Image (spheres, helix red, strand yellow):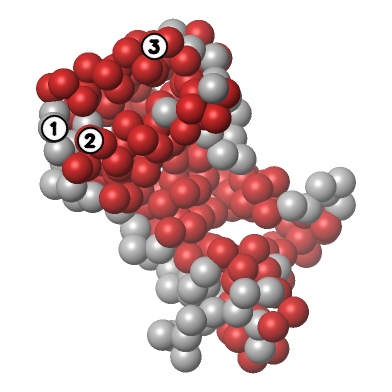
Amino acid sequence: MEHRKGARKVSDIPVEIIELLNTGYLQTVNLTEWLAVDHIVLLENVLEELGFGQESKPILHRLNDLSEKKIMKLIPAIAREWRQALDSKSEGEQSRVFTALAQHRSDSVRCWAAYMVGQNQSLSLSQKLTAIRPFAADDHFGVREISWMALRESVIAELEDSIEWLEDWVHDQEVNIRRFAIELTRPHGVWAKHITALKENPAIARSLLEPLKSDPAKYVQDSVSNWLNDASKSNPAWVQQICDDWLILSDTKETKRIVTRATRSITDQH
């Protein structure tokens, strides 16, 4: 069951799989399953599991009253509810519950914990980056995506400092960490707020892109090329120039692949 391929359509997901996802006993295996999880039902089960059954009614009531219940609105909303629920608890209890959420077998629950890091106003930018690192390196694609979305607002607020901190990340041996640094700073991003400063002046982040111009991992190559493709929509000349430079400096199949993908929007315009 854990090694299933996963259905292509929500309607094809077996009922027993949906039940196990919504009780938190299974991870999702593809985007179809990830989008099919009922986060409110899952939350009700996890609240009970972690000893918050008596406090669940008002929490669930507030979430059910939300005007928009799309997954990208629900995950941050649930993270806020957890943070509020923990505010009145002891440090030890806060630590116990956060650890349980962050290490939960359900990828959806770990997504809530990632957003709890991003929303934590008491943490500095560097502390948030340290705390988000396990989520950025998670084995599950959904947790990795949510991890950079959770820090997006923090990065926009402190962009230059963010880039400086992330310069170490792009040299990390862990492929998911290198990729995270690029996704976190994409000028457009997917399902996320745009970074206006990088749309206007993408050169600000060149120090993150340069070390990865010939990265061996396709996962990172795709991220770098998508970053540059984002930038090409507002700064095509800059993207073309950096790609031309890279082809001269780095005559590898990896660089050629990144450049081809990075310039796809520019090529389509001609």
CA separation in Å, label 2 and label 3: 17 Å
The amino acid at mark 3 is Trp
- Of 165 and 167, which appears nearest the observer? 167
Looking at the rendered structure, the number of numbered marks drawn on it comes to 3
Q: Vertically, is 130 above or below 105?
A: above
**Residue placed at 29% from the left, 50% from the top?**
218
Pointers 3 and 1 in contact (C-beta within 8 Å): no
Per the image, the residue denoted by label 2 is 255
Task: Give the residue number, with chain letter if any, for mark 1.
Answer: 251
Q: Is residue 125 left or right of residue 250?
A: right
Q: Residue at image x 66%, y 82%?
A: 13
Task: Report the side of 174 relative to 62 (left or right).
Answer: left
Within-10-Å neighbours for mark 1: few <14, some 14–19, many 20+: few
Q: Amino acid at mark 2?
A: Thr
> Marks 3/1: CA distance?
20 Å
Decide: marks 1, 2 in contact (CB < 8 A)? yes
Residue type beneath disc 1: Asp
Which of the labelled discs sits on residue 238, or is there none?
A: 3
Front-lying residue, 31 or 152: 31
> SS of the residue at dot 3?
helix
Residue 199 percent across, percent down from the top left: 51, 15
Look at the numbered disc 2 and give the secondary structure of its residue.
helix
